[in-house]
Image (cartoon, rainbow, N blue to C red):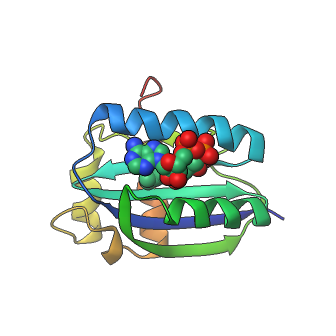
Amino acid sequence: MPVRLIYCSRALREMSLQDIQNILRTARANNERLGICGMLSYQSSWFLQVLEGPRSEVNELFLDIADDPRHDAVTIIAYEYVDEALFSDWRMGYAADGGAVAQLLHEFGLERFEPLAMSPLQALRFLRELSSAQDLAA
Ligand code: FAD
């Protein structure tokens, strides 16, 4: 049964578009091989990412990601067994701010993008809603 893991982390320096593209390039190549899909978002120095796929592959990849020197404060927000993947269209999509971020944060009662203050459901909803505005070219 597949699992869904959502975590957030803090970038150790401001990420450029090139930095994000490098992460996505590696992620898309590796995730294809591992049968993992998901979505990454980066706003205000924070990453929020969902990984979906076979349990052992997701767990191992998460440990590798958590060791990555580009970020710290890696914190699991949700981990659950799921009947089906919600992000199967993307080996690793990029959830860009298509204008929806401010509205969503307002609904969540947050003044800024603070993944640590989001409930698991809010984090999932954030990634789902922004995924519709993701930049496929990124
Ligand atoms: P390489 O990409 O060749 O990396 C080799 C080593 O160098 C790794 O230890 C890596 O952490 C480090 N490294 C690479 N680039 C840099 C850099 N610019 N600065 C500092 N160190 C660097 N990988 C996935 O496979 N799937 C994902 O979904 C995924 N999501 C990620 C999300 C975030 C927020 C971050 C920061 C990284 C993510 N990664 C992801 C990358 C992951 O952490 C590993 O770097 C990657 O899995 C290693 O791939 P590789 O074996 O092909 O080695």
In the image, taking residue 113 as reference, residue 64 lies left or right, namely right
Pick the front one: 99 or 35: 35
> Looking at the picture, does residue 93 appear above or below residue 119?
above
Q: Position of residue 137 (x, y in %)?
A: 44, 23
Inspect this view and state whether residue 62 appears: yes
Inspect this view and state whether residue 132 appears: no
In the image, taking residue 133 as reference, residue 62 lies left or right, namely right
Q: Residue furthest top?
A: 137
Q: Position of residue 38 (x, y in %)?
A: 59, 49
Residue at 61%, 56% in the rendered image = 51
In the image, taking residue 23 as reference, residue 70 lies left or right, namely left
The answer to which image quadrant residue 63 occupies is bottom right
> Looking at the picture, does residue 73 appear above or below residue 41?
below
In the image, taking residue 88 as reference, residue 78 lies left or right, namely left
Q: Number of marks in the image?
A: 0
Q: Position of residue 17 (x, y in %)?
A: 30, 33
Pick the front one: 20 or 98: 20
Residue at 76%, 40% in the rendered image = 33
Pick the front one: 93 or 82: 93
> Looking at the picture, does residue 36 appear above or below residue 99?
below
Question: Which quadrant: the C terminus?
Answer: top left
Residue at 63%, 39% in the rendered image = 91
> Looking at the picture, does residue 50 appear above or below residue 40?
below
Q: Residue furthest right?
A: 1
The answer to which image quadrant residue 1 occupies is bottom right
